[in-house]
Image (cartoon, helix red, strand yellow):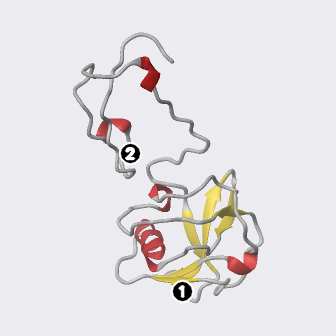
């Protein structure tokens, strides 16, 4: 347990906020709790608000292809576990495309050759970048490149 002033109580984040300050909370310094209720946050990987850079490769146009993200100094693919049209819409939005987006799975645009950076991504479809979607740690996956995700924007 900590000691000193308790600054925030009743914090109610939705998960889409870019900052803790964007979450609804009681007034600063007003609380009805003790240090036994202290919480912390452990960041294992943090994206910028823009999210990791994203590109589409091996499509027939710039509006389609295998989804790759740039993390830890290298481009890598995204696994298709749970990959949906909502996820595809976020990728297309991040790349500046509008309109209908279609998810493609099972290495529809061919298999990647680098690391598989992301798996089990869950986007609501309203996010502006892939980095704002819910996902487990980067680099943790249960995939082969035969499961690389793709999109058609």
- Callout 2: few (<14), some (14-19), or many (20+) C-alpha neighbours within 10 Å? few
Q: Which mark is residue 18?
A: 2
**Lateral position of residue 49 relative to residue 54, left or right:** left
Compute the Cα span from label 2 to label 1.
33 Å
Image quarter of the C terminus: bottom left
**Lateral position of residue 128 relative to residue 131, left or right:** left
Q: Residue furthest left?
A: 27
How far across and down, in percent of the image, does residue 76 sit? Answer: 68, 65
Instruction: Please tell me which residue is depicted at 45% across the width and 66% down the height of the picture.
Output: 123
Of pointers 2 and 1, the one earlier in the residue sequence: 2
Q: Secondary structure at mark 1?
A: loop
Instruction: Please tell me which residue is depicted at 34% across the width and 82% down the height of the picture.
Output: 99
Would you name the residue on which mark 1 appears? 61
Is residue 107 positioned above or below 142 on the image? below
Instruction: Please tell me which residue is depicted at 24% across the width and 21% down the height of the picture.
Output: 30
Is residue 22 positioned above or below 88 on the image? above
Discs 2/1, front: 2
How far across and down, in percent of the image, does residue 17 sit? Answer: 36, 47
Q: Secondary structure at mark 2?
A: loop
The image quarter containing residue 37 is: top left
Is residue 87 positioned above or below 22 on the image? below
């Amino acid at each position: 347990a900590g000691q000193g002033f308790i600054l925030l109580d009743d914090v109610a984040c939705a998960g889409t906020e870019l900052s803790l300050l964007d979450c609804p909370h009681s007034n600063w310094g007003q609380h009805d709790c003790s240090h036994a209720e202290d919480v912390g946050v452990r960041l294992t990987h943090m994206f910028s608000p823009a999210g990791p850079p994203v590109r589409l490769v091996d499509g027939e146009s710039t509006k389609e292809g295998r989804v790759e993200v740039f993390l830890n100094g290298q481009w890598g693919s995204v696994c298709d576990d749970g990959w949906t049209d909502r996820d595809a819409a976020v990728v297309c939005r991040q790349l500046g495309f509008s309109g209908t987006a279609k998810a493609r799975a099972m290495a529809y645009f061919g298999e990647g050759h680098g690391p598989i950076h992301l798996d089990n991504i869950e986007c609501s479809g309203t996010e502006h970048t892939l980095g704002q979607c819910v996902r487990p740690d980067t680099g943790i996956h249960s995939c082969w490149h035969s499961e690389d995700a793709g999109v058609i924007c």
